[in-house]
Image (cartoon, rainbow, N blue to C red):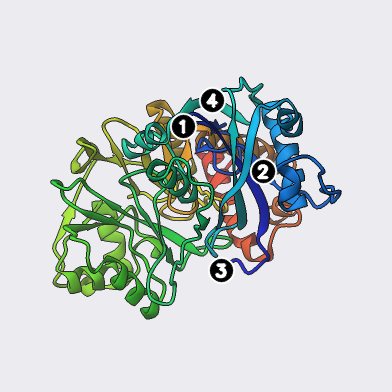
Amino acid sequence: MNNTQPLESVSVIFIHEQQIFAVQRQPYLHAFPGYHAFPGGKIDNDESSTPFETEFLCEHNTLRMRALRREIIEELGYDLEEGINKGEVLSVNELAEALAPPFAPVRFRTWFYRVDLSKRVKFDVDSGEFADSFWKTSAELLETFRTGKSLMVPPTRWVLEGLQKKPQATAFGDLSQNFAEDDRVPCLEMIEGVPQLAVRSATLPPASRTNSFMLGDLDAPKLLVDPSPNSTEEYQRLLNTIQDKKLDAIFLTHHHPDHHQFSNQLARQLKLPIILSQDTQQRLTLKNGEDYFEQVELRNVVENEEVTRWHGSPVRVYEIPGHDAGHLGLAPDSLDWFIVGDLIQGIGTVVIPSPEGDMATYFSTLEKVIALNPEVIIPSHGIPMRSTHRLIETLKHRRKRESQILKLSKSGKSKEEILEQLYEGIDPRLQPLALQNIESHLVKLRKEEQLIK
């Protein structure tokens, strides 16, 4: 749980005759890459505290108004104060506020301001921040989400849903979701039809949770992907969360504990089969005993097998080894999204462990998924992100790291010395994992005869 004080931010909803101005964030941004959103940003520590004397602005919190004006100038090239003086701005209302969930890596409290305009302004949109911008009705914006074509954080959707019901509304109040974590696992839906349960798991720091997904159209098999609670208490929370869901199977992406823990018990209790690769079945049985899957029906799957449907599109299995030899991914034929498991991390760095991992295979798998070019990448840790940008950057980073390791190894440096030089200031808890990646690179380089064995 993130116990730090939430950062404060502001967001603006420009409205003209029920047309709303919205943006699509650039896919390379660290925060919410490729998401549909409203312009805005963080309230800076050095934000001016001088009160406004301008109409509308003087009626609201000074720091938030200063931040709102500054952000609109920076992102849209539009001066809110000047717009008020020219009569373009008809009103400014504090429409809503929302607090990010307690488990968010960076937690924001956002204030949403409704700004009604006398005309549809042509903004000078910052292309470094936004890949696209548009004027649409709330119904049109929600339709892009409901058809699986846009990524949205829940508060953006709640604001749009409120405006669809009450177009003239000026105050929705606090829209923050109560996650009731004592009883249930939090559920977020950034892309329609792919709800993710943020399950506390036995994962590696800095992550503390694994995304467990629920997939399947109404008339298709319902899958629960990677249920992996780290305790009997979290197991019960997961049960409480899914008890009213009709599930047909559990799907495991791979054999690491933070992707399968308690899945055998869950399968027995709910009388569900487990879908997994043959490699994952063999590794789990070898590590946990022949009785690990006792009284559980197992179904081994391979590349291209259909396991369910999403928005009518068959969802198929993809073999994505490298991090783990039996690693599976999932994607609809439309390639509107791709669940990549631990191929990349939204939080932290992927480890290529021995003996199940292979760095050369990992490189090939990254290239394979990049070539498929899915619209959205969904990792097991962190949030969905638009485009293959993060995959491309991960591959670039690993190639650069490998070049550095090759050079240092040829100069006679040991693994420990390479670690000290390349990972200066690394969290001590992560040093063994970094050493494992260095060794995986060295194994690859020896196989390719770039290093003498």
Task: Check disc 2 and report its element: helix, strand or loop.
Answer: strand
Badge nearest the viewer, 4 or 3 = 4
Badge 1 amino acid: Gln
Q: Is residue 448 above or below residue 177?
A: above
Query: Residue 141: x, y in percent?
Result: 41, 34
- Distance CA(mark 2)–CA(mark 4): 17 Å
Q: Earlier in the sequence, mark 1 or mark 3?
A: 3
Residue 413, can we see it? no
Q: Quadrant of the C terminus?
A: top right
- Distance CA(mark 1)–CA(mark 3): 39 Å
Q: Residue furthest bottom?
A: 232
Badge 2 amino acid: Gly
Q: Earlier in the sequence, mark 2 or mark 1?
A: 1
Query: Residue 307: x, y in percent?
Result: 19, 45
Location of mark 1 (residue):
18
Residue 114, can we see it? yes
For the residues labelled 1 and 3, say whether their Cβ atoms are less than 8 Å apart.
no
- Distance CA(mark 1)–CA(mark 4): 20 Å
Query: Residue 433: x, y in percent?
Result: 58, 58
- Distance CA(mark 2)–CA(mark 1): 23 Å
Mark 4, Cα crowd under 10 Å, few <14 / some 14-19 / many 20+, is: some
Badge 4 amino acid: Asp
Badge nearest the viewer, 2 or 1 = 1
Badge nearest the viewer, 1 or 3 = 1
Q: Earlier in the sequence, mark 3 or mark 2?
A: 3
